[in-house]
Image (cartoon, coloured by chain):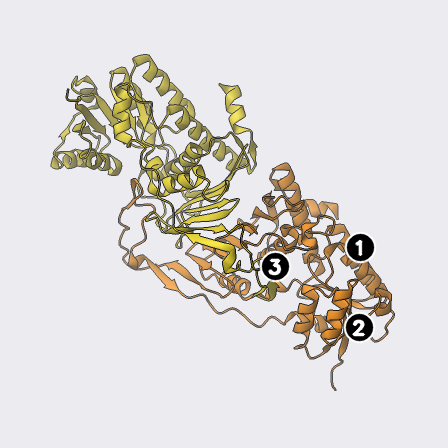
Chain colours: A orange, B yellow
Amino acid sequence: MTSKIYQLVIVGYGGMGSYHAKLLKDVQNINVIGTFDIQEEKRVASLADGYKAYDSLADVLSDATVDFVLIATPNDVHKDIAIAALQAKKHVICEKPVTIKSNDLKEIMYVADANNRQFIVHQNRRWDEDFLTVKKIYDDNIIGNAFHFESRVQGANGIPGDWRHLKAQGGGMLLDWGVHLLDQLLFMVDSKISSVYSNLSFVLGDEVDDGFQSIITFENGITALIEVGTTNFIQLPRWYVKGTTGTAIINDWNLNGKIITQNFGVEIEAPKPIQAGKGLTKTMAPPSETAISISPLPSFDATMESFYSNVVSVVEGKAVPIVKNEEVLRVLRLIETIFVSAERNEVIKNFDSLIAIAE
Amino acid sequence: MTSKIYQLVIVGYGGMGSYHAKLLKDVQNINVIGTFDIQEEKRVASLADGYKAYDSLADVLSDATVDFVLIATPNDVHKDIAIAALQAKKHVICEKPVTIKSNDLKEIMYVADANNRQFIVHQNRRWDEDFLTVKKIYDDNIIGNAFHFESRVQGANGIPGDWRHLKAQGGGMLLDWGVHLLDQLLFMVDSKISSVYSNLSFVLGDEVDDGFQSIITFENGITALIEVGTTNFIQLPRWYVKGTTGTAIINDWNLNGKIITQNFGVEIEAPKPIQAGKGLTKTMAPPSETAISISPLPSFDATMESFYSNVVSVVEGKAVPIVKNEEVLRVLRLIETIFVSAERNEVIKNFDSLIAIAE
């Protein structure tokens, strides 16, 4: 028995839409049959790339051959397109951030259930190799109990010159990149959040944030510093992780990095005080060579089903989604909490407990 | 006219006391004539180093030849020794943190005034070359308006094996290293503090903190992340500074680092999207080569009078102290505020305004 080939239409054929088209060339049981975009130049690009350009969303939804709608529009119209597509009995794949407000995602989830169709958000960075490496370090206690995570992406190009500048369209870096870093953190750490503190950066003078720093504390004691910047001409490492017996660093997306762990059961020479600036320090002196071991980063588990393969498995009832809507909802609510924390300059506590009460 | 040679006794001849003795060999108008320490081994060390070992503090204070008492004991006894020395009409140089509680410093300041003697705290890291380089970058707008400072010291040796483990003696890293980093920040940034948020780290299971992360916001918009760690097997850079037109990094006490600034008035090629993990990004792509300039760190101003020279100038009425007691008091109150913020897990606002009301 050959498996079914699913027909997919991309709505929104900009940077991400065309990127999905390229990715889907390698996916055997999904076939991109066309696109819809409100901009004429995007329709021209679609035809040039060999994809039919639908005249309207209605035309896409009334096309009975279409199994999947993939939404890669600006964020503010995800919801209306998703609900219309689900009501037309299409499965939906949606770019992140799925919606600007968490309650809009709840509505979509309700409509998906009511129409018995799948709605799955493209939180693709759960598959990033740097993240999977950190997750491996955490899951396998490679540096003891990892208790502090610093996850940063820093660029120097400002906010891209498109709708990401605009509040009404769901612009800003917390929604654009923050959603990835927060999604990775919550996917990895299985604990309730006990407190959130955040600022937002408005260096560029846009109406939306051009970056942020958030400190998140979990009930199990884990802390995280999550940071996005777009005015950073020098980059700090992508990941910095502290554990009870060592530290891990991943400098970049090419997995440059290392692990240093403490040696046990050997005679350890005490560190020698060093001259540091105008003072002496033993506390901040490098450990003696016998005290530590340097290791390369571990290989990560590559067994997690790929995003699109999982989407097909879910539609065929063979698997549960790797990106669960309840998880995406929690991340959106965390983002809403970060906005509140930054606006009030206050620590917001018991975020997860408050959610449970609100449900 | 030859200038007077001042006679100085060091009280507390441990690591810092003997370090001062070495430093003072190069100071022409201060002469170390002896030490006092309650431990026999320190008295033996003092004699071996060629310094008279006084039998008691009373003997030091009743010795009319003594002009200066330098206090390098554990932190909890600074106050009693300082007050006794000032009442005996000695000038006093005191190690940091000057006292554990800010009100104790206020008492000392009162006694110094009443006895018309100088009391000066050895905040030596105002002269650190890395700090003076950052201060130069800030003062001269080398990266535009510098608006965000990250100042870190990270070691892997835990808390040193002495009284720094003990709460009653003023142990812990916030008091030991935090006092330097906070003093540098407040010495550089001339603005009231609008909010403080901090955690404390207790990874080692001591009764005192083994590190902390604090986010400090100033009324002029400047933000700072101040961090001390003693369980960091890999070190992040000593300084990371963001400005409106560039970024500066200083990796270590040897002044390895660089500045990258934005180019203006040239035709700038847009950055090209890069593959980053499982996604494309233009936002986080490196800027094109025409867009930025890389520069070495600037030379810092070396015109600030040295610590001991300033102490002598102050005693002779020729200069005001570079380390002013009001500044040291403000840093101690900031430390007290950080303890409160961490204990409550809350943002403390209007710290400077609250102080003004309390005065």
Rendered-image quadrant of the N terminus of chain B: top left
Residue depth check, mark 1 versus mark 3: number of the one nearer the observer: 1
Disc 2 secondary structure class:
loop
* Measured Cα–Cα span from mark 2 to mark 1: 21 Å
How far apart are labels 1 and 3 at the CA level?
Answer: 23 Å
Residue under mark 2: which chain is it in? A
The residue tagged 2 is A67
Pinpoint residue A282: horizontal percent, then vertical percent: 30, 45
Give the side of residue A260 with respect to residue A176, left or right. Answer: left
- What amino acid is found at the position of numbered circle 1 in the picture? Glu
**Badge 3 or badge 2: first in the primary sequence:** 2
Query: Crowding near pointer 1: few (<14 within 10 Å), some, many (20+)?
Result: few
| Residue A163, quarter of picture | bottom right
Which residue is tagged 1? A107
Counting residues from the N terminus, which is met first, the one under dot 2 or under dot 1? 2
Q: Find numbered disc 1 in the image and state the secondary structure of the residue it sits on.
A: helix
Q: Chain of mark 1?
A: A
The Cα–Cα distance between marks 3 and 2, rounded to whole angstroms, is: 29 Å
Say above or below: A129 vs B190. below
Image location of residue B254, percent across then percent down: 32, 49
Q: What percent of the width, then of the height, locates residue A273?
A: 27, 46
Q: Please check whether the numbered discs 3 and 2 fall on a single chain.
A: yes
Q: Which residue bears the numbered disc 3?
A: A187
Q: Residues within 10 Å of mark 2 (few under 14, many from 20)?
A: many
